[in-house]
Structure formats: structure tokens, C-alpha cells
Image (cartoon, rainbow, N blue to C red):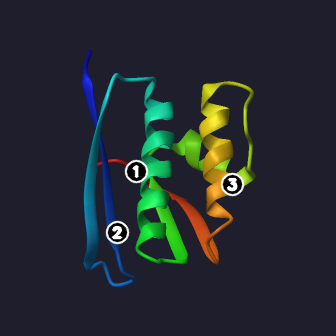
Amino acid sequence: TSTIAKELGLRNQVGDILLMGVKQGEGFSEPEIEEARACLFALRTVADYGYKRLEVEGDSLNLIRRLQSKDTPNNSLGFFISDILLFSSSFDSIVWKYIRRG
């Protein structure tokens, strides 16, 4: 079994690092599901620190588009997206932004 690391980086509006984290887990799914899993981990973590207004950046264009449109496919990815959208309703504001990797 392989190990996967989910990373989290939280910055303020001027780019200063406020919080960094890594969570390791067993196994690996398809990349889009792992991106969704990492997003859910990040949301739960920043909620624990009391942040209420978020701008979430990700490099999975398909996942960001699905979150923006609230599109939940009827598959494993859809379960994660549904959880993310449900959890994101606990924030005052959340913006989903695509950023290119590299």
C-alpha cells in the first residue's frame, strides 16, 4: 500500500503564511478524488482555526469548475464534492479559484 500526503497552506491577503499542514494517509485514488480529499482536509483545518472568509485555490480545473457550479456527479468524486459543498456552507464567504500548477 502506498502513502499519500495531503498538504495545506494558508496565506493572508498579502501572501504571508499563516498556517501550513500535512496529513498522511494510506492508499491512493484517482488524482481528482485526492484533490477533493485534500480540499476537504483544508476546509476542516481552517475551520478549526476560526477562519470564516476563504479563497480556495486549486490546480484541478475540473474540480474547481464542479465546486463553482455545485455539480455533484453520481460517483465517488460526487460524494467528496457534496461533503465539500455542505461543509463550505459553514463559512461566511468562499471563493473557488483555479491556478495553474508550476
Are discs 2 and 3 less than 8 Å apart at CB? no
Residue 46 percent coordinates (x, y): 43, 67
Which label number is shown at residue 10?
2
Quadrant housing residue 15: bottom left
Inter-mark Cα distance, 3 to 1: 26 Å
Q: Amino acid at mark 1?
A: Arg
Query: Does residue 44 sit above or below 16 in this rendering?
Result: above
Ranked by sequence position, the earlier of labels 3 and 1 is: 3
Disc 1 vs disc 2: which is toward the camera?
2
Query: Which residue is label 3 attached to?
Result: 86
Q: Residues within 10 Å of mark 2 (few under 14, many from 20)?
A: some
Inter-mark Cα distance, 1 to 2: 17 Å
Disc 2 vs disc 3: which is toward the camera?
3
SS under mark 2: strand
SS under mark 3: helix
Disc 3 vs disc 1: which is toward the camera?
3
Are discs 1 and 2 less than 8 Å apart at CB? no
In the image, what residue occupies the spot 41% across and 61% down?
A: 45
Q: Nearer the viewer, residue 13 or 72?
A: 72
Q: Amino acid at mark 2?
A: Leu
Residue that sits furthest to the front in the current view = 48
Ranked by sequence position, the earlier of labels 2 and 3 is: 2
How many numbered marks have been drawn onto this rendered protein structure? 3
Quadrant housing residue 18: bottom left
Residue 32 percent coordinates (x, y): 49, 33
Q: Nearer the viewer, residue 89 or 54?
A: 89
Inter-mark Cα distance, 2 to 3: 21 Å
Ranked by sequence position, the earlier of labels 1 and 2 is: 2
Query: Does residue 26 sit above or below 90 in this rendering?
Result: above
Which label number is shown at residue 100?
1
